Image (tube, rainbow, N blue to C red):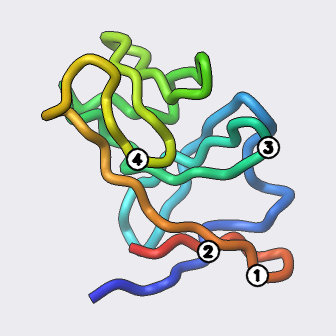
């Protein structure tokens, strides 16, 4: 069963081109702002478990700091490995609250 969980305020979210870790009901979420839009992915890289929030944003993708795996923030698809997708979580802004569905 999914639920909408507050992960922070709008002012607490990363600036454009950055990512940060947020907690959603015990789930570690990588929140990235890419071209002005927020995206939420599971924070654990499916390759070797690195935190995606420790990576960077490059060419509109979330890039893992350990081995360079690159994830589409909207679909979670990895650039070179179709079996290595990250989970993407729906997000919404409600007033000053940023909510994530987990």
Work out whether 26 lies above or below 70: below
Q: Is mark 4 on a helix, strand or loop?
A: loop
Foreground: 87 or 54?
87
Image quadrant for the C terminus?
Answer: bottom left
Question: In the rendering, at what x and y percent does residue 53 appear?
Answer: 51, 35
Question: Residue 88 lies in what quarter of the image?
Answer: bottom left
Q: Which of marks 4 and 1 is nearer the N terminus?
A: 4
- Which of the labelled discs sits on residue 99, or is there none? 2
- Residue that numbered label 1 is attached to: 94
- The reply to whether the C-beta atoms of the residues labelled 1 and 3 are less than 8 Å apart is no
Relative image position of residue 13 (x, y in whole percent):
74, 52
Q: Do the residues labelled 4 and 3 touch (CB within 8 Å)?
A: no
Mark 2 Cα shell of 10 Å, populated few (<14), some (14-19), many (≥20): many
Mark 4 to mark 1 CA distance (whole Å): 23 Å
Q: Are marks 1 and 2 in contact (CB under 8 Å)?
A: yes
Q: Mark 4 points at which residue?
A: 75
Q: SS for tag 1?
A: strand
The residues tagged by marks 1 and 2 sit, at their Cα atoms, a distance apart of: 7 Å
Residue 100, horizontal then vertical, whole percent: 53, 71
The nearer-to-camera label among 2 and 4 is 4
Relative to 102, say whether 68 is above or below. above
Sequence order check: which comes first, mark 1 or mark 2? Answer: 1
Instruction: Tell me the CA gap for discs 4 and 3.
Output: 17 Å
Foreground residue among 23 and 33: 33
Residue underneath mark 3: 36
């Amino acid at each position: 069963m999914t639920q909408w969980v507050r992960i922070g305020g709008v002012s607490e979210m990363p600036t454009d081109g950055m990512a940060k870790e947020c907690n959603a009901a015990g789930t570690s979420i990588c929140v990235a702002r890419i071209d002005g839009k927020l995206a939420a992915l599971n924070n654990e890289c499916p390759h070797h478990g690195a935190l995606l929030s420790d990576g960077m944003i490059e060419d509109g993708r979330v890039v893992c700091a350990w081995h360079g795996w690159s994830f589409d923030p909207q679909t979670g698809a990895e650039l070179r490995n179709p079996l290595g997708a990250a989970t993407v979580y729906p997000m919404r802004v409600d007033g000053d609250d940023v909510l994530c569905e987990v």
